[in-house]
Image (cartoon, rainbow, N blue to C red):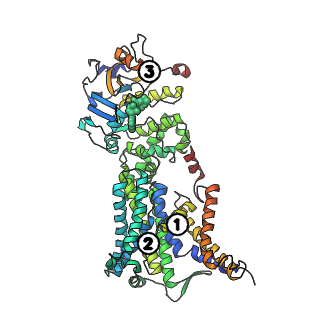
């Protein structure tokens, strides 16, 4: 949690669907069912600009489906959504990405037969060399490509992937792929980045540096929404936490208000429970780091 | 007497390996490489694109008397139209839909072309046979002389088509190379690897796939045009499903996703079947293989067994093709 950033939401009540001063993303009555399962049924949710929002919830709560709806990878049965104040209903994923909303996937999508550096360069938005007609004439895009490559190399260093630069992405380990996917998404210089379990499978020592990257993003004014099961991570970096269960947003607020919330504890543990929320047993990275 | 005249076999082998058919197959396979090797599009109807080029060009001259350059443009337009027609409904769907649709569409093209209903335009089963005149006016080679190097010689008219064919093949390899090393090529390869990832990064996968389908399809169209010019005829039954599979064979033999590989694959394929055919025929003619065992017609069938066997061996020992990358192949297994 970051003092300056959380201050924006200081006066905002910790209740589901509460309006925020400057929302970048708004979902309204968003619903999606698969057969009999109502995977997502969100009355109202606003994501504040410029902060890190953690999205938590038990397995099957509908977090990934909610991500899919927001990013255009799945279409809601009904409901409305807007991004940066504009309606984004029915927009395709690539159109949203070009508007500045980029996502990563829970099951990593590394482009295995592209080199790591090519994976990175792919992420850059609005490349003139991607036009069929210009593509064959290198002088038309060569200098742009150089600038992109330089930015890619900087990110690779930050993500400790620079030694793998020329390797096929398919040769990376699972954790490295997570890193690559996140770094690649950053290449697009998004306004909003949506990370679906970015730390899953990443070595605890690296988790710490990844967390720093995520905090950096918010420092640069990029809004972040991320799904995470590790409550230590959530506590450490979220300015605001949203809790989903059975498709609905059942609570939102600063981290401390969430862990004290009995609805949340019910959702995780199924029954009333007095113990403080400690969802998963995980490696303690603080020790691993020291 | 020697049982096999190896000089003659070698001569025939080289003439075929470097000849018209090899050039035509190479061009079509270069297009297929764009489709499958780079964009991951499963086109099982490349023969249909080849037919579109041949018929587009042939009809323009044969039936409508247009000049040569208009005819070539029409061959291209027919191929583009075919690509758009196939791509529009399928490219938004899963990859297998394109595969199914292309198989069927290519057969439909052949059957429609040979049908009596379109006789006024396509000349039905008879095919187009009166379009070559205007093309030959551009032929700088003497039709009654032979050209070539060493004992690899072609008659003037054939040589004209052979030169056009290999020139186009080289040009298309160059175009493929330029496209693929560009950011456009990066997107296309990314779509092949994982379309959703590419879309999440703002790439309009549908549009890129359509572009790739058109480019490879037009290359296929040019294969048809070169074939028509070389043979001075367009025959509907040439464009059967088997033709598509030979293009695939050439592509796989050379190595999928390597710019030069289709040319190498085609030369190898034509060299191999001609070598087997001529050796076999001579063994029969000279009595080494008795006609009670096998006659020359059967030899012509046997050559495909040999190619099939060679391909099977290749798949076992070098599944990436002759020039393909084992490293890339290994990534599939992970
Ligand atoms: N394509 C689909 N078809 C059918 N059911 C689906 C589909 N996608 C998701 N579901 C169902 O919707 C519900 C929500 O799934 P979702 O993947 O969104 O959960 P999640 O919160 O991301 O869970 P996890 O933490 O395990 O990733 C689940 O019950 C799941 O079975
Ligand atoms: Mg999920």
x and y percentages locating residue B253 in the rendered image? 57, 62
Above or below, A79 relative to B21: above
- Residue A191, quarter of the rendered image: top left
Q: Is residue B202 left or right of residue B145?
A: left
Above or below, B84 relative to A38: below
Extreme-top residue of the structure: A274
x and y percentages locating residue A175 in the rendered image? 52, 34
Where's the N terminus of chain A, which quadrant? top left
Ligand 2 in which quarter:
top left
**In the image, what residue occupies the spot 30% across and 30% down?**
A41
Letter of the chain that mark 3 sits on in the rendering: A
From the image, state whether disc 2 or disc 1 is nearer to you: 1
| Residue picked out by circle 3 | A231
The circle on residue B107 is: none
User: Are discs 1 and 3 both within one chain?
Assistant: no
Estimate how packed mark 2 is, as few (under 14), some (14 to 19) or many (20 or more) residues with alpha carbons within 10 Å: many
| Residue picked out by circle 1 | B246
Marks 1/3: CA–CA distance: 58 Å
| Residue picked out by circle 2 | B224
Q: Nearer the viewer, residue A27 or B282?
A: B282
Estimate how packed mark 3 is, as few (under 14), some (14 to 19) or many (20 or more) residues with alpha carbons within 10 Å: some
Name the secondary structure under disc 1: helix
Marks 2/1: CA–CA distance: 14 Å
Letter of the chain that mark 1 sits on in the rendering: B
**In the image, what residue occupies the spot 34% across and 55% down?**
B89
- Residue B111, quarter of the rendered image: bottom left
Name the secondary structure under disc 3: helix
Letter of the chain that mark 2 sits on in the rendering: B
x and y percentages locating residue B259 in the rendered image? 51, 60
């Amino acid at each position: 949690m970051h003092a300056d950033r959380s201050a924006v939401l200081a006066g905002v009540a910790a209740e589901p669907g509460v309006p925020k001063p400057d929302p970048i993303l708004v979902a309204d009555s968003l619903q999606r069912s698969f057969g009999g399962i109502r995977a997502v049924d969100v009355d109202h949710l606003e994501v504040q600009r410029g902060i890190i929002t953690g999205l938590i919830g038990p397995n099957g709560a509908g977090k990934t489906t909610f991500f899919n709806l927001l990013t255009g990878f799945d279409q809601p049965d009904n409901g409305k959504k807007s991004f940066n104040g504009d309606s984004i209903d029915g927009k395709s994923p690539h159109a949203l990405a070009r508007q500045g909303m980029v996502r990563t996937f829970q099951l990593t999508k590394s482009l295995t037969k592209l080199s790591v550096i090519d994976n990175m360069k792919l992420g850059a938005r609005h490349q003139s060399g991607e036009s069929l007609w210009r593509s064959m004439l290198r002088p038309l895009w060569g200098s742009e490509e150089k600038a992109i490559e330089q930015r890619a190399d900087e990110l690779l260093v930050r993500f400790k992937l620079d030694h793998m630069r020329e390797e096929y992405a398919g040769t990376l380990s699972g954790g490295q792929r997570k890193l690559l996917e996140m770094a690649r998404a950053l290449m697009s210089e998004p306004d909003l980045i949506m990370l679906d379990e970015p730390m899953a499978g990443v070595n605890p020592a690296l988790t710490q540096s990844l967390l720093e990257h995520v905090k950096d993003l918010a420092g640069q004014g990029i809004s972040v929404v991320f799904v995470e099961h590790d409550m230590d991570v959530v506590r450490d970096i979220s300015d605001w936490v949203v809790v989903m269960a059975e498709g609905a947003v059942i609570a939102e607020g600063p981290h401390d208000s969430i862990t004290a919330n009995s609805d949340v504890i019910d959702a995780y543990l199924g029954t009333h429970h007095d113990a403080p929320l400690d969802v998963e047993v995980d490696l303690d990275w603080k020790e691993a780091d020291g | 007497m020697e049982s096999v005249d190896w000089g003659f076999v070698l001569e025939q082998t080289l003439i075929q390996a470097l000849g018209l058919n090899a050039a035509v197959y190479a061009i079509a396979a270069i297009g297929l490489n764009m489709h499958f090797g780079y964009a991951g599009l499963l086109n099982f109807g490349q023969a249909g694109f080849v037919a579109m080029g041949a018929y587009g060009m042939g009809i323009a001259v044969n039936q409508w008397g247009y000049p040569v350059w208009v005819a070539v443009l029409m061959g291209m337009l027919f191929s583009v139209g075919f690509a758009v027609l196939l791509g529009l409904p399928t490219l938004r769907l899963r990859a297998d839909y394109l595969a199914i649709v292309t198989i069927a569409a290519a057969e439909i093209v052949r059957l429609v072309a040979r049908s009596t209903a379109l006789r006024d335009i396509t000349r039905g089963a008879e095919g187009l046979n009166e379009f070559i005149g205007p093309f030959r006016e551009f032929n700088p080679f003497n039709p009654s002389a032979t050209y070539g190097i060493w004992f690899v010689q072609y008659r003037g008219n054939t040589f004209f088509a052979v030169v056009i064919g290999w020139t186009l093949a080289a040009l298309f390899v160059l175009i493929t190379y330029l496209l693929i090393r560009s950011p456009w090529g990066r997107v296309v390869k990314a779509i092949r690897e994982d379309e959703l990832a590419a879309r999440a990064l703002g790439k309009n996968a549908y549009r890129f796939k359509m572009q790739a389908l058109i480019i490879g399809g037009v290359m296929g169209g040019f294969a048809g045009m070169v074939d028509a010019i070389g043979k001075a005829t367009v025959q509907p039954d040439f464009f059967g499903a088997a033709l598509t599979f030979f293009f695939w064979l050439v592509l796989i033999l050379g190595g999928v996703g390597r710019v030069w590989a289709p040319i190498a694959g085609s030369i190898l394929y034509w060299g191999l079947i001609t070598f087997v055919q001529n050796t076999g025929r001579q063994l029969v003619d000279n009595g080494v293989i008795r006609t009670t065992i096998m006659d020359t017609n059967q030899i012509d069938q046997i050559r495909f067994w040999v190619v099939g066997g060679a391909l099977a061996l290749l798949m076992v020992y070098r599944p990436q093709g002759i020039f393909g990358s084992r490293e890339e192949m290994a990534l599939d297994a992970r």
